[in-house]
Amino acid sequence: MSRVRVLVGTRKGAFILEADGKRESWQVSGPHFAGWEMYHLKGSPADPSRIYASQSSGWFGQMLQRSDDGGKTWHQPGTPPGEKPAPGPPKSASNKFSYDTTDGSGKPLTTHMWYDGTQHPWEFKRVWHLEPSLSDPDTVYAGVEDAALFRSTDGGENWKELSGLRGHDTGPKWQPGAGGMCLHTIILDPADAKRIYIAISAAGAFRTDDGGATWKPINKGLYSQYIPNPTAEVGHCVHHIAMNPKRPGVLFMQKHWHVMRSDDGGDQWTKISGNLPTDFGFAIDVHAHEPETVYVVPIKSDSEHFVPDGKLRVFRSRSGGNEWEPLTKGLPQKDCYVNVLRDAMAVDSLDDCGIYFGTSGGQVYCSNDAGDSWAPIVRDLPAVLSVEVQTLK
Amino acid sequence: MIRVALPYHLRNLAQVGAEVEVEVAGPVTQRSVLDALEAAYPMLRGAIREHDTLKRRAFLRFFACEEDLSHESPDAPLPEAVAAGKEPFIVIGAIAGG
């Protein structure tokens, strides 16, 4: 029978939630890496037992963890627990994310815009998002703060920057959003191995069509009234982008304000906020089998990061945007003031598509009927940073 | 042997107890002790010192013999009691309370 494994990253550790295909009775394991900020965990589509996890701390920096048995045991790639290290230089550096400034493949370490408009040097802070390859369990991409894209081809043991992105000539115009200048979204195109979409707060969305060597800003149609030129090529605070893998090229975006869609791989965006009560938010995702069914969780505003009116509501559009319906069954409809962050929503691929999201209040909710009804899997975790789900068949 | 005391999260990362012992050949300095520590426990690389610069991470401090050594040269000799294994070299998170 099919099963699901939900990977939850929180401010104070990681948790793994497992259930059979009914998604009614759950087993919870964790906290894994208790006390650490777990920004993101994601399983390999090519080998579901392989899971990568970003572990970080303001004191101790960035760590990278890997499981090869579905989350039962973990190790830092290249330094398995109990293995006596060999003399000599380290064989791997799973937590070393050095911007590539070498001649040839690298780009000079330049500056980006700081909050006050001055220029500021690029400084690595943490890994926000890990995106395993669709076909190779040992290949994984990492989106980091300050914004850059890294790739490992040896299971996370060593990382190399795809410096063409950071070296884009618009780099000095990129600036940090409230959460930092983070590369938080990585989408691999299943129909074209050389096409990757990424998004950065607050630079915008970019696309490569040559495997990461060169990048093109894809922000036409975005309007951001809080920047000097509201239709600038870069500088937009894109919060998240989602794509149904069965329909590559059609993208849905939750921007700082505004929900957007593109039908041409990001070349042009159209606003689809329609009747949403507010179109500020972070999370967005697409139904696994209905590519015009989209989910968002509206948040009151950029000044008040919680759901409006004390009601936790997921909004669903079955028409690709503009017409949205509130989904409330099983969700608190009074006195609720949580946030749902950009990487904290996911969908499974069972026949009855499951939708999952986690909140700043530590709840992880599941709908096993495409959003019609919801139930909490857990209620009292630390603040949830990310939710991913693996469908195990 | 040089004794090194680690904070809670680094103990968990290295899967060790509150103190570890490392062997240091030559002068006993912050650099030589941390080099030996990272050689023995490579999972600690980058967690105490920055990868490329080997500078102390901003929110960590080094103590020994009731002295704050955080701002000493990494190549300055550590106190004799540390070199003799009588006192630990202490790595600690820079936090006063909370």
Image: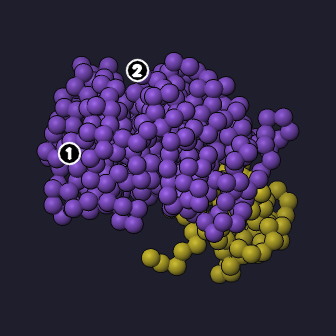
Identified at 18% across, 28% down, the residue is A22
In the displayed structure, A178 sits above or below A295; it is below
Label 2: how many residues lie within 10 Å, few (<14), some (14-19) or many (20+)? some
Please check whether the numbered discs 2 and 1 fall on a single chain.
Answer: yes
Q: Mark 1 points at which residue?
A: A326
Q: Which of A267 and A391 is in front in this view?
A: A267
Foreground: disc 2 or disc 1: 1
Identify the image quadrant of residue A88. top right
* Badge 2 amino acid: Lys
Identify by letter the chain in yellow: B
* Badge 1 amino acid: Pro
Question: Residue A388 appears at what percent x and percent y?
Answer: 38, 38
Q: Which of A306 and A101 is in front in this view?
A: A306
Identified at 32% across, 60% down, the residue is A300
Label 1: how many residues lie within 10 Å, few (<14), some (14-19) or many (20+)? some
Q: Name the residue under label 2.
A: A246
Marker count (numbered): 2
Identified at 50% across, 21% down, the residue is A190
Question: Residue A68 appears at what percent x and percent y?
Answer: 48, 30
- What's the chain of the residue with tag 1? A
Residue sitting farthest toward the bottom: B66
Image side of residue A202 versus residue B89, left or right:
left
Q: Nearer the viewer, residue B66 or B31?
A: B31
Identify by letter the chain in purple: A
Q: Is residue B15 visible?
A: no
Query: Quick check: marks 2 and 1 in contact, CB under 8 Å?
Result: no
